[in-house]
């Protein structure tokens, strides 16, 4: 049955268009040469014999037959070559198919691991910036001082940025002009820069999606809301939107870098991990009790 299938595939094997054109040209040229030489040879043999004309036409006839034979041989060898390649592939493919499947599965696993490694690298870089060792020995006190200094600096930056934002909104309330949509967009971008710098999310592709959303949406919504509801309602909605946007982006970056969410939501999102952790702690608490029971029984004896 397998040989029959291969024979059917071999019969379906076809040569390329360029090879077909070459074979057709060779066959056409050979037929023309044979046609131009066969009748003069017959006339020389049946009628007046011209030695020079007979030899010339005989040479042309031989060339035509040779060209025709070459075309036939070329076509046969081309077909046989294509068939041999097909048969060789049919013999080799079952042997390399498991390897190809394994390569595909490994590629998928590598892509998943690449995404996880990017997240881990981002977390490590953020921790390196927050936990720099001191010049004089790098003790616990130095690390605590650096972490405290970093948190205080971040808090001061946050307070300063909040004051600037409030000042900008007060200015826009007093002087609402044509530049309001663009100033609001700039505020969104400033807060995005602050959070991105805080968690060092420059190399995370998802962080750039967060910056494109306000660039595309805020100007349009600002113009439409200003026309329909007025500038005061526009600024109120934009202030609420800025708080929601900044909070969501901050929580996303914090979860991406530190794996922490408010109210321990990161643990609730991973119930399997919590159960394993509690089971491990339960076993640890039981092991000292089990080790103390044989000692008590030995002392009693």
Image (tube, rainbow, N blue to C red):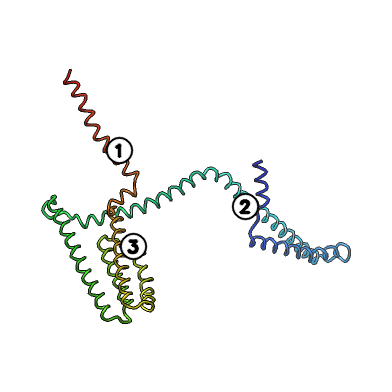
The numbered mark at residue 207 is: 3
Residue 226 image-quadrant placement: bottom left
Quadrant of the rendering where the C terminus is positioned:
top left
- Mark 3 element type: helix
Q: Decide: marks 1, 3 in contact (CB < 8 A)?
A: no
- Mark 2 element type: helix
First in residue order: circle 3 vs circle 2: 2
Relative to residue 55, is residue 262 depicted above or below?
A: above
How far apart are labels 3 and 2 at the CA level? 53 Å
Q: Residues within 10 Å of mark 1 (few under 14, many from 20)?
A: few
In the picture as drawn, the residue positioned furthest to the top comes out as 301
- Residue sitting at 67 percent across and 48 percent down? 8
Q: Which residue is mark 2?
A: 82
Relative to 108, 50 lies left or right: right
Q: Which residue is mark 1?
A: 279
Q: Residues within 10 Å of mark 3 (few under 14, many from 20)?
A: some
Q: What x and y, as percent, mark residue 72?
A: 70, 56
Q: What x and y, as percent, mark residue 231?
A: 32, 78
How far apart are labels 1 and 2 at the CA level? 64 Å
Q: Residues within 10 Å of mark 2 (few under 14, many from 20)?
A: some
Quadrant of the rendering where the N terminus is positioned:
top right
């Amino acid at each position: 049955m397998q040989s029959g299938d291969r024979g059917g595939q071999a019969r379906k094997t076809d040569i390329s268009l360029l090879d077909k054109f070459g074979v057709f040209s060779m066959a056409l040229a050979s037929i023309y040469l044979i046609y131009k030489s066969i009748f003069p040879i017959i006339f020389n043999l049946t009628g007046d014999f011209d030695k020079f004309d007979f030899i010339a036409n005989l040479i042309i006839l031989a060339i035509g037959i040779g060209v025709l034979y070459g075309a036939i041989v070329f076509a046969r060898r081309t077909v046989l070559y294509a068939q041999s390649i097909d048969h060789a592939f049919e013999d080799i493919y079952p042997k390399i198919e498991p390897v190809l499947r394994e390569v595909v599965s490994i590629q998928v696993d590598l892509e998943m691991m690449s995404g996880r490694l990017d997240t881990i690298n981002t977390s490590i870089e953020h921790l390196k910036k927050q936990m720099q060792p001191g010049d004089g020995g790098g003790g616990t006190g130095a690390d605590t001082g650096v972490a405290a200094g970093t948190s205080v600096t971040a808090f001061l930056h946050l307070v300063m940025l909040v004051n600037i934002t409030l000042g900008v909104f007060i200015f826009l309330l007093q002087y609402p002009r044509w530049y309001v949509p663009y100033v609001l967009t700039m505020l969104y971008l400033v807060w995005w820069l602050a959070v991105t710098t805080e968690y060092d999310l420059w190399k995370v592709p998802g962080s750039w999606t967060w910056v494109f959303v306000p660039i595309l949406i805020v100007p349009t919504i600002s113009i439409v809301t200003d026309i329909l509801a007025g500038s005061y309602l526009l600024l109120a909605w934009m202030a609420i939107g800025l708080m929601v946007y900044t909070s969501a982006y901050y929580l996303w970056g914090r979860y991406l870098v530190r794996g922490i969410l408010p109210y321990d939501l990161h643990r609730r999102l991973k119930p399997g991990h919590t159960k394993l952790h509690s089971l491990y702690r339960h076993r640890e608490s039981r092991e000292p009790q089990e080790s103390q029971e044989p000692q008590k029984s030995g002392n009693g004896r």
